[in-house]
Image (cartoon, grey):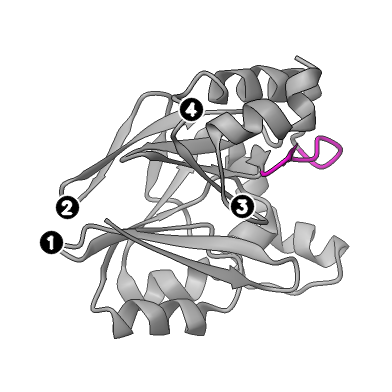
Amino acid sequence: MIIKKLIVGSLENNCYIIADEKTNECFITDPGDEPDRILDLINKNNLIIKYIICTHAHFDHVAAIPEIKEETKAWIVLHSDDLNMYRSTKDQAAAWGYEIDPLPEPDIFVSEGDILEVGGLKFEVLHTPGHTQGGICLYGEGIVITGDTLFAGSVGRTDLQGGDISKLRKSFKRLMSLPDEVKVLAGHGPESTIKKEKIDNFFSHEI
């Protein structure tokens, strides 16, 4: 498995590229900005994008989708509970002083328990609302990509559109039930592990 991380945009979103090293088929999560950098990395590594996966629909995680979709024709993946937010990203961005292009419509809506495959790699969709209503994590191959549900030492905000602290508590508790050795790849900040978050995350003491 190939894991590439690009920190993109002024809000420093982590965009991950996960590829099967045997087939070079891959998916991208949360391309929030700097599409040229993302596409350059993909092209230099001869990767084939199958999915563009949105862990949630805040603008800083999706703003580069138009250019990447146009270049690669990859399928855009979203949970339907975030569709209205996804369609309002231009207004979201404007409220923060940013201007982004309208987004193409999603190609696939995923739900709890769905499996996404690239090459021989399989990832299970975990519906983890709280930061947004349609937030998802991707679990498989010894990693969990958590978007803004879980960070190293922290969790996502609940005071933005779609936030719900009670749902976030349940989602956090669920992630903590994963095996200790699972590596956490979060939407912002450094990597961690489930074991480390059980010990160090401030939210562990609020459950």
Q: Residue tagged by mark 3? A: 187
Which mark sits nearer the N-terminus, 1 or 2?
1
Which mark sits nearer the N-terminus, 4 or 1?
1
Pair 4/3: label in front: 4
Which mark sits nearer the N-terminus, 4 or 3?
4
Q: Residue tagged by mark 2? A: 119
43 vs 49: above or below:
below
Marks 1 & 2, CB-CB < 8 Å contact: yes
Identify the residue at horizontal 34%, vertical 76% (top origin): 42
Residue 162, image x and y in percent?
74, 35
- Residue 159: say if magenta: yes
Pair 1/2: label in front: 1
In this view, the residue in front, 133 or 48, is 48
In the image: residue 26, left or right of residue 64: left
Marks 3 & 2, CB-CB < 8 Å contact: no
Q: Residue tagged by mark 4? A: 180
Q: Residue tagged by mark 1? A: 22
Q: How far apart, in angstroms, are the residues tagged by discs 1 and 3? A: 26 Å
Asked if one can make out residue 127 in the rendered structure from this viewpoint, the answer is yes
Marks 1 & 3, CB-CB < 8 Å contact: no
Pointer 2 local density, CA inside 10 Å: few below 14, some 14–19, many at least 20: some
